[in-house]
Amino acid sequence: MASIKPSVPKGTRDFSPAVMVKRNYIFDTIKSVFRKFGYQEIQTPSMENLDTLTGKYGDEGDKLIFKILNSGDYLSKVKPEKLTTDNSQGLIKDISEKALRYDLTVPFARYVVMHQNDISFPFKRFQIQPVWRADRPQKGRYREFYQCDADVVGSESLLNEAEFVLIYDEALSKLGLKDFTIKINNRKILSGIAEIIGKPELIVDMTVAIDKLDKIGLDGVVKELIERGFTEADIEKLKPVILLEGSNEEKLASLKNVLAASETGLKGIEEIEVIFSYLRSLSFGEGRGEAKLELDITLARGLNYYTGAIFEVKTNEVAMGSIGGGGRYDDLTGMFGLKGLTGAGISFGADRIYDVLEELKLFPESTEETTKVLISNFDAEAELYALPILQQLRNSGIAAELYPSSAKLKKQMSYADNKKIPFVILIGSDEIQSGKLTLKDMRSGEQDKLSVEEIVEKVKA
């Protein structure tokens, strides 16, 4: 039989031990903050019923769902005439009943509806699991990747939104980021702006154009707005919004004037003000974290999805897209028949955060260590002598291993180097006789003769 060249499917990756330690450092840091704010972890299956996922992401999203063929003879129930048509889409329902999950939000909505009688509302959950999309792989875009979400359903309180700001601030500061911006907007403000111009149907065109102000300047934005169906009179009304400057408070004051005639717009401003007042009471910005909070009315992510506050997080230390985002949505569970349950959620872009920490060299050295102490192995006598010591180190909570066979010292030392093991215990005949072991610090090269108890103390310190 011909040998097969090993490979992984396009758009997927292996993660080495060195990478996994760093990824877990990110996930563990974020999880600890989620838990601190009362969020509890759930997991849902990698696969869902296809009809659970279909129709929730729009036509383009549906095409990117990875379908799973029915097991056994999957064509047995298909009518022969269907097999002769060119339209394979019509076959999908007959040959596939399950699919890999596309995101964590729809499975979460299904979970809430299925378990509504066992859940205490408001329900605060976080979930860190892989999702799959049949997208064209390219740099930074994978077919299998992890999402890292926290959502609360069953609470209209804007305290949730204020706490999302604190969660981002604390988690990213804990990961070592020193300069990042949490941008906030409200869908109702955008609706209000489109409303006062009298073109609510052009809300998306308007925000896409305004969003390019940094890149193409005011003249470029005006030109694009005219191409998208806005008049000179519309643009005069829009200019104070496009050129909104000053502190968050000054921006809100300007918006109140511009949106005086829009009830929806004023409601959006009021919601932002409530979030800001919660944050003042929660001492946001008083030296605990590194985040800057910025009201950015060009922020328009997920317009067909979000109904209230919208968030996006950007690092200012590295050229990188957003490293987090989210917002308030209404009726998450309506798609499964449970109406009127409002929710809000955020996510962390773990892969992008990984790249940022790597570029800024922010991973602590300890994430590169797996084993703390390696015990050398020179011969059968030394091996036998080392076994109780190995157990004593592990009982003391120290990650330790014994080199598994007698080998030249050089080979054992390079094993410790490659695994970034900081300490090596050398056991020869002198050590066995005296009971004092040689502890070599691999970083400084220093060697000490110590008892096992002294070694435990030094390694732990």
Image (cartoon, grey):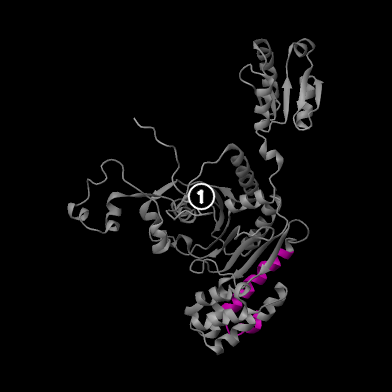
Q: Residue furthest bottom?
A: 233
Looking at the image, residue 451 sits to the left or right of residue 188; the answer is right
The picture places residue 87, in percent across and down from the top left corner, at 26, 59
Q: How many marks?
A: 1
Query: In front: 81, or 294?
Result: 81
Depicted 162 relative to depicted 416: above or below: below
Looking at the image, residue 61 sits to the left or right of residue 313; the answer is left
The picture places residue 196, in percent across and down from the top left corner, at 55, 84
| Label 1 sits on residue | 145
At x 68%, y 45%, the residue is: 363
Quadrant into which the C terminus falls: top right
At x 71%, y 74%, the residue is: 249
The dominant secondary structure in magenta is helix
User: What is the span of residues highlighted in magenta in the rendered image?
Assistant: 255-280
In which quadrant of the rendered view does residue 447 lie?
Answer: top right
Looking at the image, residue 327 sits to the left or right of residue 62; the answer is right
Depicted 392 relative to depicted 54: above or below: above
At x 51%, y 51%, the residue is: 119
Could one spot residue 122 in this view of the protein? no
In which quadrant of the rendered view does residue 285 lie?
Answer: bottom right
Depicted 161 relative to depicted 425: above or below: below
Amino acid type for the residue under numbered disc 1:
Phe
Could one spot residue 304 in this view of the protein? yes
Query: In front: 283, or 198?
Result: 198
